[in-house]
Amino acid sequence: MIHSADKISDTLAASGFALRPAEERGKADFGWLRSAHSFSFGQYFDPGHMGFESLRVINDDWVAGGGGFPPHAHADAEIFSYVLSGGLQHRDSLGNGSTVMAGGVQYMSAGSGVTHSEFNPSETEPMQFLQVWLNPNVSGAEPRYDTLDIAPVDKDGKLALFLSPTGRDGSMAIRADADIYAATLDGEQQITRDMAPGSRAWVQVARGSLSVNGQALRRGDGLAIREAGRLNFADGADAELLYFEFA
């Protein structure tokens, strides 16, 4: 696989970090949908940005009131939506239906195949979410669906685990080799994370700004981390982030 940040400075490469700047992401604008793609997706294709480890898609989506994705099919993909504002309404061929509001996560393991739709249930207010796909570690499994609300206190100045291979610590079980966390960071708050030897990580900034080991990040930036060690998240200014760790 060609990783997502081969076009980086020698300084970042030497540090084991690879920055994916927000402004270099692929863009799409369909009126009802505005999207920024961290990796190749749809009409945006860049062989230098095809994914990272099992991470395949991070789309920063803005959906106008009443807009949404009509029924469409998926198979063998682990997909979750992290809602940042408004609500996201889901319906699928398995009979599942829910509306996930800001701070919530919906997860779908497409497995052997499922058809679903996603809409903004408000006719007037826009909504925003991060749509994330990962490659599964098993093919043709039975599809499944789950949701989880992350309480603000659980991610305030700390990493809140919400997806993991084993579903440990109250997280949802994902069929991918990744632990996925959310966190908010502001003011003097700091988060320290010791990556296990041999692991890699990705940081995606959902809002605000922060630093990771002194590397400044702002909304929409992604950071690939290819060397295990201690990470320090600091300098948060109304920051919200997703942290992916791959064994």
Image (cartoon, rainbow, N blue to C red):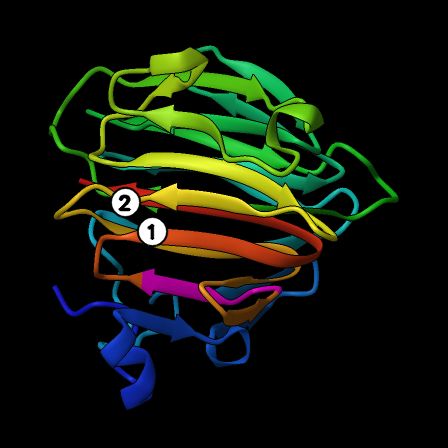
- Where does the image place residue 238, in percent across and percent down from the top left? 74, 53
Question: In this orientation, which residue lies closer to the viewer: 63 or 20?
Answer: 20
Residue 209 located within the stretch drawn in magenta:
no
**Labels 2 and 1 touching (C-beta < 8 A):** yes
For the question of whether residue 41 can be seen, the reply is no
- Which disc is residue 195 wearing? 2
Above or below, 206 against 78 in this view is: below
Question: Can you name the residue that lies furthest to the bottom here?
Answer: 10
**Residue annotated with mark 1:** 230
Mark 1, Cα crowd under 10 Å, few <14 / some 14-19 / many 20+, is: few
| Relative side of 169 to 23, left or right | left
The structure residue drawn at horizontal position 49% and vertical position 69%, both measured from the top left corner, is 214
Residue at x 29%, y 50% (from the top left corner): 55
Q: Position of residue 150 (x, y in %)?
A: 61, 24
Amino acid type, mark 1: Arg
Label 2: which secondary element: loop
Compare marks 2 and 1 and give the one earlier in the sequence.
2
Q: Is residue 223 magenta?
A: yes
Tell how many labels.
2
Between 194 and 89, the one nearer to me in the picture: 194
User: Compared with residue 30, is residue 86 higher up or lower down, i.e. above or below?
Assistant: above
Which residue type does callout 2 highlight?
Met
Q: Nearer the viewer, mark 2 or mark 1?
A: 1
**Stretch of the chain drawn in magenta:** 219-224
Q: Residues within 10 Å of mark 2 (few under 14, many from 20)?
A: some
Question: In the picture, which quadrant includes the C terminus?
Answer: top left
Element marked by disc 1: strand
Expressed as whole percent of the image width and height from the top left, the position of residue 234 reads 58, 56
